[in-house]
Image (spheres, rainbow, N blue to C red):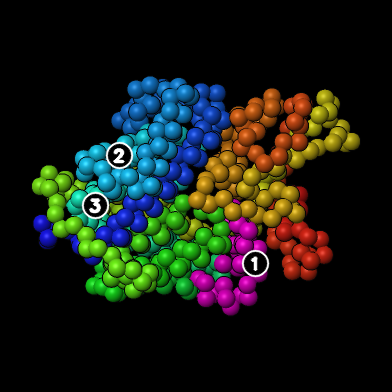
C-alpha cells in the first residue's frame, strides 16, 4: 500500500491530530461552562423549545433522542474525556477501529451541541472544527501510514478557509482594496486582545503593509499548498506566521489555531528534522483494505460536495461561513468581508432604587471579554470562546441581533440568576438583585499614547 500512504508525514499527522484534539477539548470545556444560562432548560434559548420546533432531519443531534441539562453535561464531559485522551496521544496506540471510533464519537457529540444550540453556535469556526474533526477520523494511527488522500483533503480545507477569506475581503469592503481596513479593525474587532491597542497605534504605512500581507497570504499563497515540496511547506509556513499575527492582535476563538494546525499537516518530516534537529523514524507504509475503501469513499464524498463551496467562491454574491448541509461538511469560509469604522458597546447597568429618578445610582455590570471599564486592559481569551460577549458585539451593531435572547438575559439579572452571573466578570449586586436594569449605547475609541500615559485608560467612551 505504499502508493496509498505518505511516509514522510508521520509527525505532521500526529501534530494535526493532537492539535485538533486540543481544540475539541477547549470547545467541550466552553460548552460545559456556558450551556445552562444560554441553552439549558431554563436558558435564554432553551434547547427543549428548539427540539420541539425543529426535527432531526433539519438539525441532526442526539438530543432529539433525549434531552436534560444533566445529559448535556454528560455529553460535554464525554467529549472532554475523549479529546483529552487524543491530546495525550493515546489514540495513536489504540487499535485502528477504536481510534477511528473515538474521533467519530467526538464529532457526533460536538455536532449534536452545535446543531441544537442555535444562535450561540452560529460561528464559522464551529463548522470548521466539525469538518476538520470529521477528516481526522480517517487520519489513522501509528499502525497505518498517513493517507495521502486525507492529507490532500486537509489542504483543500485550508485552501477554502484562506482563499475564501481573501475573496470575501476583496469583494466586500472597499477599504480592503484601498488598504485602509486596518486603520479601524484592531479597534473595532469583536473582542480586542491585550496587544490590540498597540497594533492599532502602528504607523499607517505599516497598516498598509499588514493589508498587503493579508492579501498575499490569502489570495496567492493558498495555491502553493498543492505545489511540490518544499514550495508547499513554505506556503504553510507563511500561513502559520500570518495566523500567529492574528492570534497576537485579537481574540478569534479557535479560528486561527485551527488554521495553524491544518498547516502543520502540510510540512513533511524532512523539514521538521532540519528545524527541530531530530531524526524521525519513517512512518508505516501499510493500510488495511477496509480502511483504504473508507478513505476513498470520504474522498469521493468531498469531491462531490465541493461543488457548492466552489460555486460560492466564484460567485459575485459570495456568502461567508455557510454550511451547505446539516452535517457541517465541506463548507465555505470567510471572515470580515466588511469592517466597522466605529466601535459601539452596549453597557448594562442596574439600580437598587425602587423608583427611578434623576438621583438614582446606576451600577455597571462587567463582562469577561468585551470592553466596559475604560481602565481595564483587554484580555486574551482565545481559543476559549465567550459566546455572550461575542453576541453583545453584534447587538451593538444592530438591536435585531439581540432580540431572541436579550430579554431573557435581563430577566435573569433581575433575579441574580447564578448561572448567568458566572458568565460575567463583575456583578455589582452581590447581595440582592437590582430593581431595574437598563442598557445604554456608547461609542468606544482607543486612547492615544498621551491619554494612556496621563489617565491609565485604554479606552475613551461617549454615551450615545
Whole-angstrom CA distance, mark 1 to mark 2, is 43 Å
Q: Disc 1 on helix, strand or loop?
A: helix
Cβ atoms under marks 1 and 2 closer than 8 Å:
no
Q: Does the magenta run of residues contain 191?
A: yes
Which secondary structure is most common in the magenta stretch? helix
Q: Residue furthest right?
A: 359
Nearest to N terminus: mark 1 or mark 2: 2
Q: Which residue in the protein does label 1 denote? A: 198
Nearest to N terminus: mark 1 or mark 3: 3
Whole-angstrom CA distance, mark 2 to mark 3, is 15 Å
Cβ atoms under marks 2 and 3 closer than 8 Å:
no
Q: Disc 2 on helix, strand or loop?
A: helix
The residue range painted magenta reads 182-211
Q: Which residue in the protein does label 3 denote? A: 142
Percent x, y of residue 436: 76, 29
Please give the count of numbered marks on the rendered protein. 3
Which label number is shown at residue 102? 2
Amino acid at each position: 500500500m505504499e502508493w496509498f500512504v505518505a511516509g514522510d508525514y508521520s509527525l505532521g499527522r500526529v501534530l494535526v491530530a493532537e492539535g485538533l484534539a486540543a481544540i475539541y477539548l477547549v470547545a467541550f470545556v466552553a460548552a460545559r461552562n456556558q450551556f445552562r444560562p444560554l441553552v439549558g432548560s431554563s436558558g435564554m434559548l432553551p434547547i427543549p423549545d428548539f427540539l420541539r420546533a425543529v426535527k432531526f432531519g433539519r438539525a441532526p443531534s442526539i438530543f432529539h433522542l433525549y434531552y436534560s441539562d444533566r445529559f448535556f453535561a454528560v455529553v460535554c464531559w464525554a467529549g472532554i474525556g475523549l479529546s483529552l485522551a487524543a491530546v495525550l496521544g493515546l489514540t495513536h496506540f489504540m487499535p485502528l477501529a477504536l481510534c477511528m471510533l473515538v474521533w467519530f464519537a467526538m464529532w457526533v457529540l460536538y455536532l449534536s451541541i452545535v446543531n441544537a444550540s442555535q444562535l450561540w453556535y452560529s460561528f464559522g469556526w464551529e463548522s470548521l472544527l466539525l469538518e476538520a474533526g470529521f477528516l481526522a477520523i480517517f487520519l489513522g494511527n501509528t499502525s497505518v501510514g498517513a493517507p495521502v488522500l486525507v492529507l490532500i483533503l486537509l489542504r483543500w480545507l485550508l485552501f477554502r478557509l484562506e482563499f475564501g477569506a481573501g475573496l470575501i475581503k476583496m469583494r466586500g469592503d472597499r477599504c480592503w482594496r484601498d488598504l485602509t481596513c486596518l486603520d479601524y479593525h484592531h479597534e473595532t474587532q469583536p473582542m480586542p486582545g491585550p496587544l490590540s491597542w498597540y497594533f492599532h497605534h502602528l504607523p499607517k504605512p505599516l497598516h498598509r503593509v499588514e493589508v498587503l500581507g493579508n492579501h498575499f497570504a490569502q489570495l496567492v499563497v493558498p495555491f502553493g499548498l498543492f505545489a511540490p515540496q518544499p514550495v508547499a511547506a513554505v506556503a504553510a509556513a507563511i500561513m502559520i506566521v500570518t495566523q500567529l499575527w492574528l492570534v497576537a492582535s485579537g481574540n478569534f476563538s479557535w479560528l486561527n489555531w485551527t488554521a495553524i494546525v491544518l498547516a502543520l499537516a502540510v510540512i513533511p518530516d524532512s523539514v521538521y528534522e532540519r528545524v527541530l534537529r531530530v531524526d524521525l523514524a519513517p512512518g508505516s507504509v501499510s493500510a488495511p483494505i477496509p480502511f483504504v475503501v473508507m478513505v476513498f469513499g470520504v474522498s469521493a464524498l468531498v469531491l462531490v460536495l465541493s461543488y457548492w463551496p466552489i460555486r460560492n467562491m466564484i460567485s459575485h454574491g459570495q456568502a461567508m461561513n455557510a454550511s451547505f448541509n446539516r452535517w457541517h461538511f465541506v463548507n465555505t469560509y470567510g471572515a470580515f468581508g466588511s469592517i466597522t469604522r466605529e466601535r459601539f458597546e452596549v453597557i448594562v447597568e442596574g439600580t437598587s432604587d425602587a423608583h427611578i429618578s434623576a438621583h438614582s445610582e446606576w451600577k455597571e455590570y462587567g463582562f469577561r471579554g468585551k470592553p466596559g471599564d475604560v481602565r481595564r486592559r483587554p484580555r486574551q481569551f482565545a481559543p476559549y470562546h465567550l459566546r455572550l460577549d461575542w453576541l453583545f458585539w453584534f447587538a451593538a451593531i444592530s438591536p435585531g441581533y439581540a432580540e431572541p435572547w436579550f430579554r431573557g438575559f435581563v430577566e435573569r439579572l433581575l433575579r441574580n440568576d447564578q448561572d448567568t452571573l458566572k458568565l460575567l466578570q463583575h456583578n455589582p449586586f452581590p447581595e440582592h438583585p437590582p430593581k431595574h436594569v437598563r442598557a445604554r449605547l456608547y461609542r468606544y475609541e482607543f486612547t492615544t499614547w498621551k491619554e494612556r500615559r496621563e489617565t491609565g485608560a485604554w479606552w475613551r467612551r461617549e454615551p450615545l
